[in-house]
Image (cartoon, helix red, strand yellow):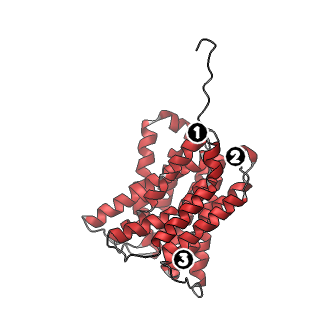
């Protein structure tokens, strides 16, 4: 594997600890209607890319050549995923809906094999599938706390959770087809997501003014971090890194988020958390055997007099 691919994969990894802050910040954000929260946070998240576009003429030039394809994909991915995800949480038990939603990393691993050759398709091996399966088992433990998930009933909610998983995995893999589009384009995806969420909020919800202080700061932090910067580094990682490694490593997010909720006192401790962490770490290591073996720095061509 070329050094650039390893670097891009490492950049994509940065999204995972940032996403792990999402549950804790959402708790602090309080009782803000979900679509309103999407509109507010994605408005803040778009500022990250807009500032970069204002600073970089080259990024603006690349963006003008992008066409509508990547923009429509980005809007579908960001707005479609969050709309389906919030519907899932409203119509099914949170832990069980989260488990169904967390099929998306496995789907990324599987769908990455369907990419065309020019987009960097990689062959799936038994190690990739075994690692993804073990990591998913760890996610089940992290989210359920060692209990037995009950998936009967709430069919609509679980259907929306599955739709969310399909949307996000498809979006993540399909961004590979637009590797020439700068990741600053995510700003446009965020802006349009905020606009669509605002329309849906006006039609379906009543506006709630965020309280000054912790609630407002939590909303800003959500927009800048989990629903902002994380999408930019994830976009870059998916376009230029190893999708299989990113998919399996995403399972660290539920472990980290559960640990943060526990350490902050926002959620009771789950004894199964450590076993979940071991399973996910084992799955990631199993998947990464060939990743790090083939990650070599670029060779430097020496002149005869060097």
On the picture, is 173 further left or further right than 58? right
Q: Residue at x 45, y 69 (%)?
A: 35
Which of marks 1 and 3 precedes in the sequence? 1
Which of marks 1 and 2 precedes in the sequence? 1
Task: Give the residue at the far top of this rendering.
Answer: 305
Q: CA distance from mark 2 to mark 1?
A: 13 Å
Q: Nearer the viewer, residue 87 or 136?
A: 136
Badge 2, how many Cα within 10 Å: few under 14, some, many 20+? some
On the picture, is 152 further left or further right than 204? right
User: Percent position (x, y) of residue 276?
Assistant: 51, 70
Give the position of the N terminus as an image quadrant.
top right
User: Percent position (x, y) of residue 293?
Assistant: 63, 45
On the picture, is 214 further left or further right than 262? left
**Kind of element beneath mark 1:** helix
Badge 1, how many Cα within 10 Å: few under 14, some, many 20+? some
Indicate the quadrant where residue 251 lies.
Answer: bottom right
Residue position marked by numbered label 2 in the rendering = 120
Badge 3, how many Cα within 10 Å: few under 14, some, many 20+? many
Give the position of the C terminus as an image quadrant.
top right
Residue position marked by numbered label 1 in the rendering = 4
Q: Nearer the viewer, residue 150 or 168?
A: 150
Q: Residue at x 30, y 63 (%)?
A: 216
Against 140, residue 154 (above or below) is below
**Kind of element beneath mark 2:** loop
Q: Nearer the viewer, residue 271 or 188?
A: 271
Mark 3 and mark 1 residues within 8 Å of each other at the beta carbon: no
Q: Nearer the viewer, residue 156 or 296?
A: 296
Residue position marked by numbered label 3 in the rendering = 97
Mark 3 and mark 2 residues within 8 Å of each other at the beta carbon: no
**Kind of element beneath mark 3:** helix
Residue 111: tell me if it is visible.
yes
């Amino acid at each position: 594997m070329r050094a650039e691919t390893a670097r891009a994969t490492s950049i994509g990894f940065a999204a995972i600890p940032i996403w792990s802050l999402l549950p804790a910040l959402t708790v602090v954000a309080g009782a803000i209607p979900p679509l309103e929260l999407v509109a507010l946070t994605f408005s803040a998240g778009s500022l990250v890319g807009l500032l970069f576009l204002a600073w970089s003429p080259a990024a603006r030039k690349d963006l003008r050549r992008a066409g509508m394809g990547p923009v429509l994909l980005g809007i579908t991915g960001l707005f479609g995923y969050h709309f389906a995800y919030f519907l899932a949480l409203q119509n099914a038990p949170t832990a069980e809906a989260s488990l169904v939603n967390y099929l998306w990393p496995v789907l990324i691993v599987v769908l990455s094999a369907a990419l065309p050759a020019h987009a960097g398709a990689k062959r799936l091996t038994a190690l990739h599938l075994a690692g993804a399966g073990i990591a998913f088992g760890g996610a089940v433990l992290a989210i359920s706390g060692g209990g037995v998930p009950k998936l009967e009933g709430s069919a609509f909610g679980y259907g929306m959770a599955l739709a969310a998983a399909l949307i996000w995995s498809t979006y993540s893999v399909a961004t590979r087809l637009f590797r020439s589009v700068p990741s600053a384009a995510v700003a446009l995806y965020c802006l349009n997501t905020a606009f669509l969420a605002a329309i849906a909020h006006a039609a379906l919800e009543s506006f709630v003014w965020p309280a000054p202080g912790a609630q407002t700061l939590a909303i800003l932090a959500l927009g800048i971090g989990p629903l902002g910067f994380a999408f930019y580094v994830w976009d870059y990682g998916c376009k230029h890194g190893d999708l299989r490694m990113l998919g399996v490593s995403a399972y660290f997010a539920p472990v980290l988020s559960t640990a943060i909720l526990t350490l902050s006192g926002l959620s009771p401790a789950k004894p199964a958390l450590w076993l979940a962490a071991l399973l996910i770490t084992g799955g990631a290591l199993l998947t990464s055997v060939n990743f790090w073996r083939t990650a070599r720095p670029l060779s430097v061509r020496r002149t005869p007099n060097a």
